[in-house]
Image: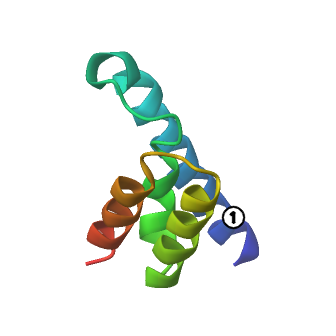
Amino acid sequence: MFVLMSLVGAVQYITGFGIASIFRDSYNLYPTFGTELSAGFARGHGTAGVVGSLLQGANQHYWRLHKVLLQLMQQ
C-alpha cells in the first residue's frame, strides 16, 4: 500500500511540474506554479493556508493567487 501511495504522489508531482514546464513561457506563470496541483489533490485546506503563509513570509508577490488555487482545487 505504501508503494502504491508513493507512486500516486510521485505521478501527481510529475504531472504538476510537467504542466508548469510546458505552459510556463506561454502564460508567464509564477515560479512555484505546479506545486499546488499535487498539493491541492493530495492534501487538505490547511496546506493552502500554510503554503500561502510561507510564501507571504518570503515576500513572494503571488502568495494570494497560490493560496486561492489550492483552495479551489480542494472543492
**Please, what is the three-letter code of the amino acid marked with disc 1?**
Ser
Q: Is residue 72 left or right of residue 50?
A: left
Q: Secondary structure at mark 1?
A: helix
* Scheme of colours in the image: rainbow
Q: Residue at x 45, y 55 (%)?
A: 63
- Quarter of the image for the N terminus: give it: bottom right
Q: Is residue 9 positioned above or below 1 on the image?
A: above
Q: Residue at x 40, y 64 (%)?
A: 67
Residue shown at 47% from the left, 25% from the top: 21
Q: Nearer the viewer, residue 50 or 35?
A: 50
> What is the quadrant of residue 27 in the picture?
top left
Classed neighbour count for the residue bearing mark 1: other residues with Cα under 10 Å, few (<14), some (14–19), many (≥20): few
Q: Position of residue 5 (x, y in %)?
A: 64, 70
Where in the figure is residue 54, as x and y percent of width and height?
62, 63
Please name whichever residue, 42 or 55, is drawn nearer the observer in this view of the structure.
55
Q: How many marks?
A: 1
Above/below status of 20 relative to 35: above
Q: Position of residue 39 (x, y in %)?
A: 51, 64
| Placement of 56 over or under 72, stated as above or below | above
Residue at the disc numbered 1: 6
Locate the C terminus by quadrant.
bottom left
Question: Residue 45 location, x and y as percent?
Answer: 43, 82
In the displayed structure image, the side of residue 1 where residue 65 appears, left or right:
left
